[in-house]
Amino acid sequence: MLRAETRMRARALQLLYALEITGDATTDVGADGLARLTGDVRLVVDDVEPMVRHILARRADIDRLAQAATDNWRLERVATVERNILRIAIYELQCGEVPAKVVIDEALWLAHRFAGGRAPAFINGVLDRVGRDLGRL
């Protein structure tokens, strides 16, 4: 059984992915659809949608931090799933409410579960650098 926080991050990843793929700028329709598909109505409405709205509001700053930590990679070339895992984790690193090592471990779990075989190492390297740049590691 997944912890509620882990499930929240997985749902946030799914919502961010859907919004990016469809080009939708609002979370309302995507959150409703995700809640219907997963059955996590309260989780999606109460926790995931507000988190995703905050990530989208800070996306330019989050992407700038990610880009600075990805040597020789343009962020738009990073796969959509990996890019959104980074966005969730960098947002949490910026907020400072969750210990940095927990944020990184959760991001690595998402990468193992939803991304390609090389994604965990890439994500770990980027988040380690961002965490150091933010003074969290």
Image: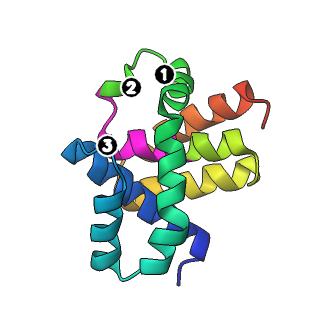
Give the residues in magenta.
Answer: 77-88
Q: CA distance from mark 1 to mark 2?
A: 6 Å
Front position in the image: 126 or 51: 51
Q: For the point 60% across and 42% down, which residue is it?
A: 91
Lateral position of residue 97 relative to residue 115, left or right: right
Question: Which residue does the numbered mark 3 point to in the structure image?
Answer: 25
Question: Which residue does the numbered mark 2 point to in the structure image?
Answer: 75
Q: Quadrant of the C terminus?
A: top right
**Do labels 1 and 2 touch, CB within 8 Å?**
yes
Question: Which residue does the numbered mark 1 point to in the structure image?
Answer: 67
Residue 17: give x, y in percent of width and height.
32, 50
Q: In the image, is residue 105 above or below residue 46?
A: above
Residue 100: give x, y in percent of width and height.
73, 47
Specify which label sits upstream in the sequence, 1 or 3.
3
Amino acid carrying label 3: it is Ala
Q: In the image, is residue 26 above or below residue 57?
A: below
